[in-house]
Image: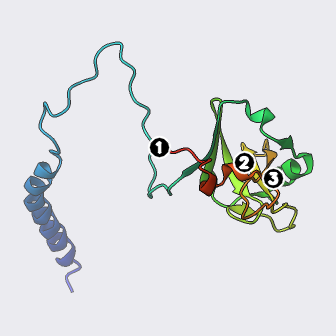
Amino acid sequence: MCGFDLRRPAAAWLCGLMLLGAAPALAGALERTEPGHQAPPQPGSSLPVAPPIVQYALPSQWMTIHSKEDWRKAGSFEKELSKDCAALRFNEIEPMRFRAFYKGEVLGVAFGHGLNLHDPGKKADRKKIYLFRNGDSTNCTVQSVDNQDPRVNPAGSQANTPAAGGFKKY
C-alpha cells in the first residue's frame, strides 16, 4: 500500500508498443492505386455527374414514363391530393422508386392500385397513375394520369398492350 499503482503505466506502455507495431501495417493499406493509374481530365471537358454518397446501396429505380411534353400537360392537377401530399397523408412509399421523365423534369410515380403509394385515407382511384413533383416536401404537387394498362383499366387503350406491340424497347 505505497499509493503508487503500477497497473496504469504498464497498460499505457503496452498499448504504445502495440500501436508502434501496427503503424507499418497501416501505412501500406493507404496506398490504393499506383500514382499514374487514372489520367487527369482534359482542360475544358465537362466532368461526369457523380452519384450521391450514401451509407447504403440505392434501391433499383425504374423509368415508367418517358415523354417529350411538359409535365403540366401530362394529366390533371389534383388540388386536394397535393394538400394531402404536403401533409404526408398521400405520398410515395419509396420516393423515386418509379420515375417519370417529362422534358427535363423527373417526377416520382405511384400507382392508384397501391404500388408504391402511401394512402391511409383511401383517396386514390385504382385506375390512375399519380405523378409527384417535390414529393418529399411541403411544396408537393400531384398530377393524375389514366392508367392505360388493360389489366387495371379495361377501358384503356388496347394499342399499348404488349400483345399489340405497343411497347418500345429502349
Q: CA distance from mark 3 to mark 1?
A: 25 Å
Judging by the rendered image, the residue that carries numbered circle 2 is: 135
- Residue 85's disc number: 3
Mark 3–mark 2 contact, CB under 8 Å? yes
Residue 7 quadrant = bottom left
Residue 95: percent from left, percent from top: 64, 53
Q: Residue at point 79% right, 41% down?
A: 139
Residue occupying the far right of the picture: 80
Secondary structure at numbered mark 3 = helix
> Within 10 Å of the Cα at label 2, are there few (<14), some (14-19), or many (20+) other Cα atoms?
many
Image quadrant in which the N terminus is located: bottom left
Judging by the rendered image, the residue that carries numbered circle 1 is: 52
Q: CA distance from mark 1 to mark 2?
A: 19 Å
Mark 3–mark 1 contact, CB under 8 Å? no
Return the residue nearer the eye: 121 or 63: 63
Instruction: Look at the picture and state if 8 lies above or below 132.
Output: below
Return the residue nearer the eye: 112 or 117: 112
Instruction: Look at the picture and state if 80 lies above or below 19.
Output: above
Q: Residue at point 86% right, 67% down?
A: 122
Colour scheme of the picture: rainbow
Residue occupying the far top of the picture: 44
Return the residue nearer the eye: 84 or 30: 84
- Residue 33's disc number: none
Q: Residue at point 15% right, 54% down?
A: 26
